[in-house]
Image (cartoon, rainbow, N blue to C red):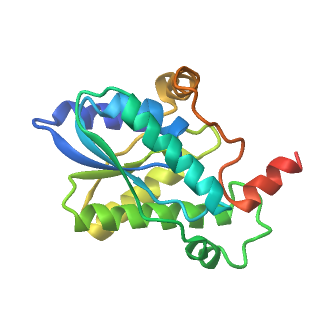
């Protein structure tokens, strides 16, 4: 399934400006997505990432995201909200999966945790759509992420914006924007297990 084509069709059908809740993991991954979608939506970025290994890292990524949004000029409104740092939510969710390889069952649990929180927030706060920046990463499975989004769309009766932001060189554009705005680019996904995997490469 070509999720970029689905996104194109959705954007074509918009007949008025809509409210989008965009789950974001960091500034670099958000940069291209904000540039792309802010033409069509008023965007609220939900920074909900209990998987991040330390509060210091969590705050550093949040600070860079807020700085980028402040400095980057957009056609429509973009703002950032954070639900705070609570690593226990993540650690409880992935208990028993600590030795799983990157991209395995532990990561699926992590995606579901963050996307479900986003879907609930979008529904409770009357957003028109919700989605995530995670599909921009070459290391993330867009099919899996969009399938989770579809499940949550039906569960919470809130529109999920299907995407594969790495398409059309979206990931490459995020690197360009990261250099242009001198954004902090971490070399691991966020959790202590992904950091361990990176160290052991």
**Numbered marks: total:** 0
Residue 189 visible in the picture: yes
Q: Is residue 126 above or below residue 74?
A: below
Q: Position of residue 116 (x, y in %)?
A: 42, 66
Q: Residue at x 29, y 33 (%)?
A: 38
Relative depth, front residue between 4 and 99? 99
Q: Position of residue 44 (x, y in %)?
A: 31, 48
Q: Residue at x 45, y 38 (%)?
A: 67
Relative depth, front residue between 67 and 80? 67
Q: Position of residue 49 (x, y in %)?
A: 53, 60
Extreme residue in the right direction: 200
Locate the N terminus by quadrant: top left
Query: In the rendered view, does 42 fall on the left or right side of 93?
Result: left
Q: Position of residue 164 (x, y in %)?
A: 46, 38
Locate the C terminus by quadrant: top right
Question: Would you identify the image quadrant in which residue 41 lies?
Answer: top left
Relative depth, front residue between 112 and 10? 112
Extreme residue in the left direction: 15
Question: Would you identify the image quadrant in which residue 108 lies?
Answer: bottom right
Query: In the rendered view, does 195 fall on the left or right side of 190?
Result: right
Relative depth, front residue between 60 and 157? 60
Q: Residue at x 41, y 38 (%)?
A: 3
Residue 1 visible in the picture: no
């Amino acid at each position: 399934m070509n999720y970029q084509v689905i996104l194109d069709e959705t954007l074509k059908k918009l007949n008025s400006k809509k409210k989008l809740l965009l789950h974001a993991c960091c500034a670099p991954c958000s940069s291209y997505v904000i540039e792309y979608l802010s033409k069509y939506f008023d965007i609220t970025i939900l920074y909900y990432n209990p998987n991040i290994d330390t509060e210091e890292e969590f705050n550093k990524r949040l600070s860079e995201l807020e700085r980028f949004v402040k400095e980057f000029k957009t056609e429509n409104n973009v703002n950032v909200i954070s639900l705070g740092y609570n690593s226990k939510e993540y650690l409880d969710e992935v208990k028993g999966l600590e030795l799983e390889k990157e991209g395995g069952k532990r990561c699926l649990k992590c995606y579901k945790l963050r996307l479900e929180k986003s879907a609930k927030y979008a529904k409770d706060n009357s957003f028109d759509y919700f989605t995530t920046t995670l599909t921009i990463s070459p290391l993330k499975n867009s099919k899996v992420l969009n399938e989770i989004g579809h499940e949550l769309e039906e569960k919470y009766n809130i529109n999920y914006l299907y995407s594969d932001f790495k398409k059309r060189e979206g990931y490459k554009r995020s690197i360009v924007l990261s250099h242009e705005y001198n954004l902090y680019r971490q070399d691991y996904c966020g959790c202590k297990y992904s950091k361990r995997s990176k160290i052991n490469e």
